[in-house]
Image: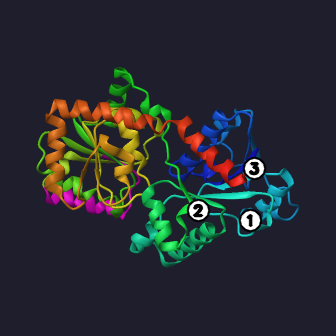
């Protein structure tokens, strides 16, 4: 079998869809050494992030060969990939980032799969420009209707696809995301203390990880913090204008000295940052899956998420949950996790167990099962 991937995100994005793409390709290639995997990338310079994958003997990067389209990367991504699929005899083409080439149906011998991560732009339209909302909607809807199979990263996303794009349930397979194995590797005490000193982390802190934007609802933790003494809040993520609101809210609540926002943190530092936290809190109003919840559980950190989207899938029975508008309930749960040793121990134990269900090989098996079903093998 030969499986081809859209490599745009894998080659260019250090986080988010880039991490997902590299995780999927690596997991499959390691699990199925007899299958050939091709990563389609429009520019030859786009391969630094792919270096670890290229060490695997069954992974190949494919660049444009069409005499005209190789000079026009965007056009090649839209139209030229289909030309390459026919030449290389791909059995499956998997669009890892919510889209498929416009003319993908011309590759008649290749079955198509697309991963849809979320429909956030439909739920929070005011956080996107009009043109971005329109482009995303057209791309996502078109990909869903043209694909032979859709992979949704959560049951929540699958329901949204069915509801808003009128896609039959039987066309959708739910295959969860996994997280990098380093989050489940225990960091040494010396390494953690070095990270603490270098980043000036407080002795005790609540942790939240993710872009500091309105949808993530980080302000709820700030409001809860005024009811939780003797602990700080560390927020790790890219700043947006909402970060200024979070800091303003912290001043109004009298907790500004206990709130620290860290941006541009190296991914290598994240496991230690997680594992030194008293509790991880993720009060997001909407997620496609909520990978930080899983990263926390993998590292033995008790986690609290918000109800209303898919976080209960990401955390299962290992985590606690609160209404995304109830700061006092969040404060109560934070205090319980920090003071009730039996509860904490139980959450840590359940967290390890729940995270084990997202092991790389299990998710790779589920993806390959989907490919073989679509290809009729």
Callout 3: SS: loop
Q: Which residue is mark 1?
A: 104
Instruction: Please report whichever mark, 2 or 3, sits nearer to the chain's N-terminal start.
Output: 3
Q: Is residue 287 left or right of residue 86?
A: left
Instruction: Please report whichever mark, 3 or 1, sits nearer to the chain's N-terminal start.
Output: 3
User: Residues under labels 2 and 1: Cα distance?
Assistant: 18 Å
Q: Which residues are magenta?
A: 235-253
Q: Which disc number belongs to residue 295? A: none
Q: Nearer the viewer, mark 2 or mark 1?
A: 2
The quarter holding residue 183 reads: top left
Q: Based on the picture, tell me whether residue 221 belongs to the magenta stretch.
A: no
Q: Is residue 271 above or below residue 144?
A: above
Q: Which residue is mark 2?
A: 171
Callout 2: SS: helix
- Image coordinates for residue 5, horizontal then vertical, percent: 68, 51
CB of mark 2 within 8 Å of CB of mark 3? no
User: Residues under labels 2 and 3: Cα distance?
Assistant: 35 Å
CB of mark 3 within 8 Å of CB of mark 1? no
Instruction: Please report whichever mark, 2 or 1, sits nearer to the chain's N-terminal start.
Output: 1
Q: Residues within 10 Å of mark 3 (few under 14, many from 20)?
A: few
Q: Residues within 10 Å of mark 1 (few under 14, many from 20)?
A: many
Q: Which residue is mark 3?
A: 44
Q: Is residue 113 left or right of residue 134?
A: right
Taking the spot 43% from the left edge, 53% from the top edge, the residue there is 289
Q: Is residue 193 above or below residue 202?
A: above
- Give the prevailing secondary structure in the magenta stretch: helix
């Amino acid at each position: 079998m030969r499986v081809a991937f859209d490599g745009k995100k894998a080659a260019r994005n250090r986080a988010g869809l880039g991490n997902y793409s590299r995780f999927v390709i690596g997991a499959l290639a390691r699990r199925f050494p007899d299958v050939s995997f091709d990563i389609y990338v429009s520019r030859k310079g786009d391969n630094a992030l792919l270096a670890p994958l290229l060490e695997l003997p069954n992974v190949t990067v494919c660049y444009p060969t069409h005499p005209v389209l190789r000079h026009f990367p965007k056009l090649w991504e839209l139209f030229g990939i289909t030309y390459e699929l026919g030449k290389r005899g791909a059995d499956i083409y998997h669009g890892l980032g919510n889209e498929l080439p416009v003319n993908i149906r011309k590759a008649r011998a290749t079955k198509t799969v697309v991963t849809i991560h979320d429909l956030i732009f439909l739920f929070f339209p005011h956080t996107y420009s009009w043109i971005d909302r329109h482009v995303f909607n057209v791309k996502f809807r078109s990909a869903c209707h043209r694909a032979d199979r859709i992979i949704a990263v959560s049951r929540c996303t699958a329901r949204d696809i069915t509801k808003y794009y009128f896609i039959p349930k039987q066309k959708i397979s739910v295959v969860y995301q996994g997280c990098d194995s380093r989050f489940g590797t225990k960091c040494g005490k010396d390494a953690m203390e070095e990270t603490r000193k270098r980043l000036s982390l407080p002795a005790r802190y609540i942790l939240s990880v993710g872009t500091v934007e309105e949808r993530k609802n980080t302000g709820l933790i700030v409001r809860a913090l005024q009811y939780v003494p003797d602990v700080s809040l560390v927020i790790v993520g890219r700043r947006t204008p909402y970060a200024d609101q979070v800091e303003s809210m912290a001043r109004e609540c009298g907790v500004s000295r206990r709130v620290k926002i860290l941006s541009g943190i190296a991914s290598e530092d994240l496991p230690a940052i997680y594992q030194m936290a008293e509790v991880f809190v993720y009060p997001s109003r909407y997620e496609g899956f909520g990978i930080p919840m899983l990263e926390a559980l993998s590292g033995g950190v008790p986690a609290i998420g918000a109800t209303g989207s898919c976080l209960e899938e990401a955390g299962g029975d290992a985590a606690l949950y609160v209404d995304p508008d109830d700061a006092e309930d969040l404060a109560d749960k934070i205090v319980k996790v920090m003071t009730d040793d039996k509860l904490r121990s139980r959450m840590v134990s359940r967290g390890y167990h729940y995270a084990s269900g997202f092991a790389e090989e299990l998710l790779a098996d589920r993806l390959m099962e989907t490919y073989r079903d679509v290809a009729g093998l």
